[in-house]
Image (spheres, helix red, strand yellow):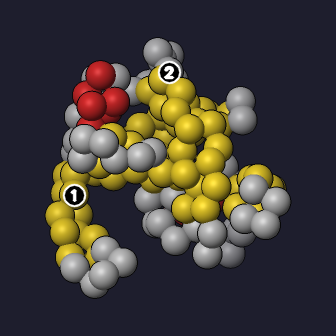
Amino acid sequence: MGTFRHPVEIAATEAGPFAQVEAIVDTGATYSMFPRPLIAQLGISPREQAEFVLADGRRVLRDLAIVTVRLDGRVRPSVCVVGDDGTEARLGAVTLESFGLAADPVNHRLVSAPLYLL
């Protein structure tokens, strides 16, 4: 696993307005995560809660929301975790896969990945 930063924009809807953040591309995270103040500023409301396992094995409940993500000029809806104040934005596997992207942690970039239809 490895991490690096990549710009991403999020909004409540495709019409915007979009807010740009430098997100950590985290190959170990399932969902993307954005700080609660940013989510609230954009008018996005959490929809439900889910239980997550932290790196140290603890289990925590976190709010989930649907955000509109603009990444490298393309737009998709994505489930995200609503992080606490001060949480750094993260791009997780679900968002990356929905865009057909994968992390190249050696070269610190996003690369095209195959989309499977099985």
State the residue position of label 1: 62
Q: Left or right? Give the position of 11 relative to 53.
A: right
Q: Nearer the viewer, residue 85 or 13?
A: 85
Q: Quadrant of the C terminus?
A: bottom right
Q: CA distance from mark 2 to mark 1?
A: 23 Å
Q: Left or right? Give the position of 30 relative to 83.
A: right
Residue shown at the point (47%, 66%) measured from the top left: 29
Secondary structure category for the residue under label 1: strand
Q: Residue flagged by tag 2: what amino acid is it?
A: Phe
Secondary structure category for the residue under label 2: loop
Q: Nearer the viewer, residue 105 or 115?
A: 105
Decide: is 52 above or below 93. Answer: below
Please state the horizontal and vertical placement of residue 92, each as a whole percent of the image.
Answer: 52, 58
Please state the horizontal and vertical placement of residue 53, each as a whole percent of the image.
Answer: 29, 76
Numbered disc total: 2
Residue shown at the point (24%, 47%) measured from the top left: 84
Please state the horizontal and vertical placement of residue 95, each as a whole percent of the image.
Answer: 55, 52
Q: Left or right? Give the position of 98 relative to 109.
A: left
State the residue position of label 2: 18
User: Given the current orientation, which residue lies at the most extreme front position?
Assistant: 86
Residue shown at the point (22%, 51%) measured from the top left: 63
Image-quadrant location for residue 62: bottom left
The answer to whether any part of residue 3 appears in the image is yes
Q: Residues within 10 Å of mark 1 (few under 14, many from 20)?
A: some
Q: Residues within 10 Å of mark 2 (few under 14, many from 20)?
A: some
Tell me the number on the disc at residue 54: none
Q: Residue flagged by tag 1: what amino acid is it?
A: Arg
